[in-house]
């Protein structure tokens, strides 16, 4: 996503604005590059050897898939995937590319437990707090997301999440929600201090045995 002076509002993904987003070649280029980086992080050696393969034997979830720029890279890597997003307007573009998509709020994913091996979420996580009106609600949004992200993947499965927290406090809130939700992992900051700065979380769902 571009580092604009103003953060995009969720309105940027509904109605005509969804078409504007989806038709921009530079946006496609940025999102493709970001997703390629996310796929690298899913296999980052700092997470250790993967317990669950990342290949065409498994299914991956692309949460906040939007019109499918991030999903393009899953397809490019011959991965089987399902895209999940709140906006039907965005999903329409992804569906027209032939992608499997399901309308969903990332806090209430309509999938069975452990339906997926791994997941990505590119440039969407921070929108989860859109409706929060207090600090408690803000924290509750990240807590709900972490619980759902954990529920729908297998133990040992991984997520690479790229997002735009407003400040360090939001970043810490997100990271600690994922840790409470059963993940281990770390933050990666690419191009720190530069206008191209991007923040990624590389996460692995711990097994119950490891957690207790
Ligand atoms: C910047 S777009 C990113 C789309 C895509 N990942 C890409 O690479 O182009 C952010 C997406 O997050 C979605 N989104 C926002 N809030 C959401 C929520 N609560 N649940 C699911 N998707 C949400 C929006 O509809 C939008 O499509």
Image (spheres, rainbow, N blue to C red):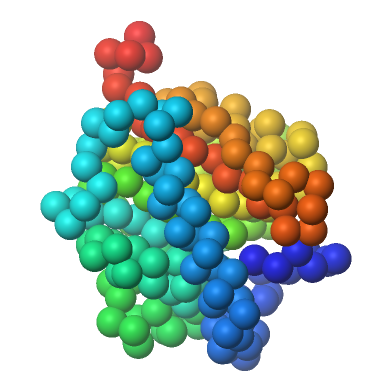
Q: Nearer the viewer, residue 64 or 37?
A: 37
Residue 207 lies, in percent from the top left, at 30, 22
The image shows residue 38, relative to residue 157, as above or below, that is below
Q: Quadrant of the C terminus?
A: top left
The image shows residue 10, relative to residue 179, as above or below, that is below
Q: Nearer the viewer, residue 177 or 193?
A: 193
Residue drawn 28% across the image and 13% down it: 209
Residue drawn 60% across the image and 85% down it: 24
Residue most toward the top?
A: 212
Q: Nearer the viewer, residue 134 or 187?
A: 187
* 17 left or right of 66 in image: right
Residue most toward the right?
A: 5
Q: Nearer the viewer, residue 136 or 7?
A: 7
Residue 41 lies, in percent from the top left, at 45, 43
* 26 left or right of 48 in image: right
Residue 210 appears anywhere in the view = yes
């Amino acid at each position: 996503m571009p580092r604009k002076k103003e953060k995009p509002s969720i309105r940027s993904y509904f109605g005509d604005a969804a078409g504007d987003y989806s038709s921009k070649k530079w946006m496609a280029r940025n999102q493709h590059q970001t997703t390629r980086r996310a796929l690298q992080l899913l296999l980052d050696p700092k997470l250790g050897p993967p317990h669950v393969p990342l290949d065409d034997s498994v299914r991956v979830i692309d949460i906040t898939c939007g019109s499918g720029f991030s999903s393009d890279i899953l397809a490019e890597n011959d991965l089987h995937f399902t895209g999940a997003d709140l906006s039907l307007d965005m999903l329409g573009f992804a569906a027209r590319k032939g992608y499997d998509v399901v309308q969903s709020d990332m806090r209430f994913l309509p999938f069975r437990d452990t339906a997926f091996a791994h997941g990505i979420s590119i440039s969407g996580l921070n929108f989860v707090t859109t409706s929060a009106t207090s600090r408690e609600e803000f924290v509750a949004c990240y807590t709900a997301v972490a619980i759902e992200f954990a529920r729908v993947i297998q133990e040992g499965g991984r997520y690479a999440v790229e997002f735009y927290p407003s400040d360090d406090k939001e970043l810490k809130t997100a990271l600690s929600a994922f840790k409470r939700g059963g993940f281990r992992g770390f933050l990666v900051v690419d191009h720190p201090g530069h206008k191209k700065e991007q923040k990624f979380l590389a996460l692995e769902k711990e097994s119950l045995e490891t957690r207790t």
